[in-house]
Image (tube, rainbow, N blue to C red):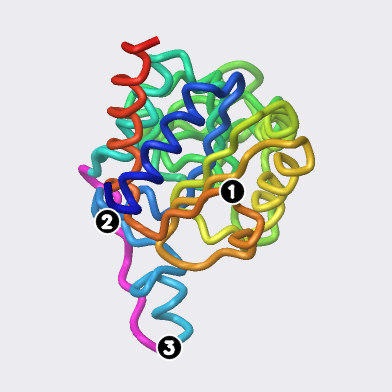
Amino acid sequence: MTDLNQRITGLAQWILASKYLVVFTGAGISTESGLRDFRGPDGLWTRRDKGLATPEQNWNNVEPNSGHVAILELQKLGKLAFLISQNVDNLHLKSGIRPELLAELHGNLTKVRCVQCDFKMDRVEGERKCPLCGGKLKSTVVDFGDSLPAKDLTESYEHSEKCDLFIVAGSSLVVYPAAEMPRVALNAGAKLVIINQGETPYDTNAHMLFPEGISEVLPAAVARLKSLKKTY
């Protein structure tokens, strides 16, 4: 077996043995859906730092890719305890992830919330007032300098503290407080797996590293997991 196959098998075995799996995703999981990441070789911030043009993201007609589907499969298999995402693209919910299993730390382009009672709902064209209290509706997307949504942040900390396996998929882990979650998991004794095409500050702490693309790793690991489950 190649080194990649060995690591994929090892990851599948860890998922099988895990009692509380938390997955953490960043922009890198959505690149195969046609969205740019931020700190990859051609990411938005990478281009900005080089003085290059940073084209507008086209959010229309974007669909989940094999990485999103693999995480959905973990949910279907009963192996996903919780999913933490830094992404605003709605692709996890679009793939079929149950809302109660998902924390969207930086918001969601398709959702709005009431500034008065914090009610959250799908964005409706022309809708500006909360149907519950009449308060003003605003986008849930977190701008620089804004506080992260309290419920999502609290749940992220709580589930990271409970997990025994924490898988990072497509994040450079440099944006805080979201990037605190791997540290919380490590402090709780969890194994840390990082799948990311680029270095992260946590690489030396990871129990398993995958510099390969997410589509090379997660779907194969889930397929291997299914075959392992059949033998037990």
- Identify residue for label 1: 207
Residue 120: mark: none
Question: What percent of the width, then of the height, locates residue 96?
Answer: 35, 22
Tell me which residue sits at (66%, 46%) in the image.
Answer: 182
- Out of 87 and 184, give the one closest to the viewer: 184
- Identify residue for label 2: 58
Tell me which residue sits at (69%, 34%) in the image.
Answer: 160
**Residue 107 location, quadrant:** top right
Q: Amino acid at mark 1?
A: His
Tell me which residue sits at (60%, 19%) in the image.
Answer: 19
- Out of 67 and 35, give the one closest to the viewer: 67
For the residue carrying disc 1, how many other residues have a C-alpha within 10 Å: few (<14), some (14-19), or many (20+)? few
Could you tell whether 35 is left or right of 173 in the image? left
- Identify residue for label 3: 50
Q: Amino acid at mark 3?
A: Lys
Q: Is residue 158 above or below residue 149?
A: above
In the rendered image, residue 126 lying in the magenta stretch gets the answer no
Query: Are the residues tagged 3 and 1 within 8 Å (C-beta)?
Result: no
**Predominant SS of the magenta segment:** loop
